[in-house]
Image (cartoon, rainbow, N blue to C red):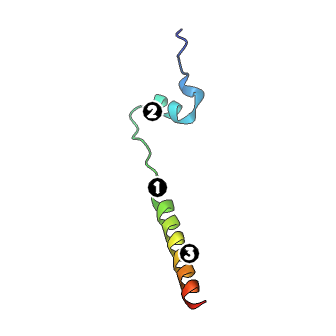
Amino acid sequence: MAENYTDPSGNTEAFRAFANPDAPAETASRTNLIVGAAVVAAVLIALATWLAFG
């Protein structure tokens, strides 16, 4: 056996690709990105309001 052989059961993602090669790759959800951007926007608006009227 070659020294650079990597066992597909070594990590979950590689094993899933090995066990089910026809399955499409999972895509990351953009919901977390949208929620994070909304939180950052709200904080920036609150900061700007506090600086303007504070």
Residue annotated with mark 3: 43
Relative depth, front residue between 46 and 8: 46
For disc 1, the neighbor class at 10 Å (few under 14, some 14 to 19, many from 20) is: few
Q: CA distance from mark 3 to mark 1?
A: 23 Å
Number of the front mark, 1 or 2: 1
Residue 18 shows which numbered tag? none
**Image quadrant containing the C terminus:** bottom right
Earlier along the polypeptide chain: callout 1 or callout 2? 2
Judged from the image, the secondary structure of the residue bearing numbered disc 2 is loop
Residue type, numbered disc 3: Val
Does 45 appear above or below 28? below
Relative depth, front residue between 52 and 37: 52
Relative depth, front residue between 9 and 38: 38
Residue annotated with mark 2: 20
- Residue at left 46%, top 51%? 28
- The furthest residue to the bottom: 53
Please state the horizontal and vertical placement of residue 26, each as a whole percent of the image: 44, 45
For disc 3, the neighbor class at 10 Å (few under 14, some 14 to 19, many from 20) is: few
- Residue at left 52%, top 65%? 36
Please state the horizontal and vertical placement of residue 6, each as a whole percent of the image: 54, 21
Number of the front mark, 3 or 2: 3
Q: State which quadrant residue 20 falls in.
A: top left
Please state the horizontal and vertical placement of residue 42, each as a whole percent of the image: 53, 76
Does 36 appear above or below 9? below
For disc 2, the neighbor class at 10 Å (few under 14, some 14 to 19, many from 20) is: few
Does 43 appear above or below 4? below
Residue annotated with mark 1: 29
Earlier along the polypeptide chain: callout 3 or callout 1? 1
Residue type, numbered disc 1: Ser
Q: CA distance from mark 1 to mark 2?
A: 22 Å
Earlier along the polypeptide chain: callout 3 or callout 2? 2
Instruction: Report the side of 51 relative to 27 (left or right).
Output: right
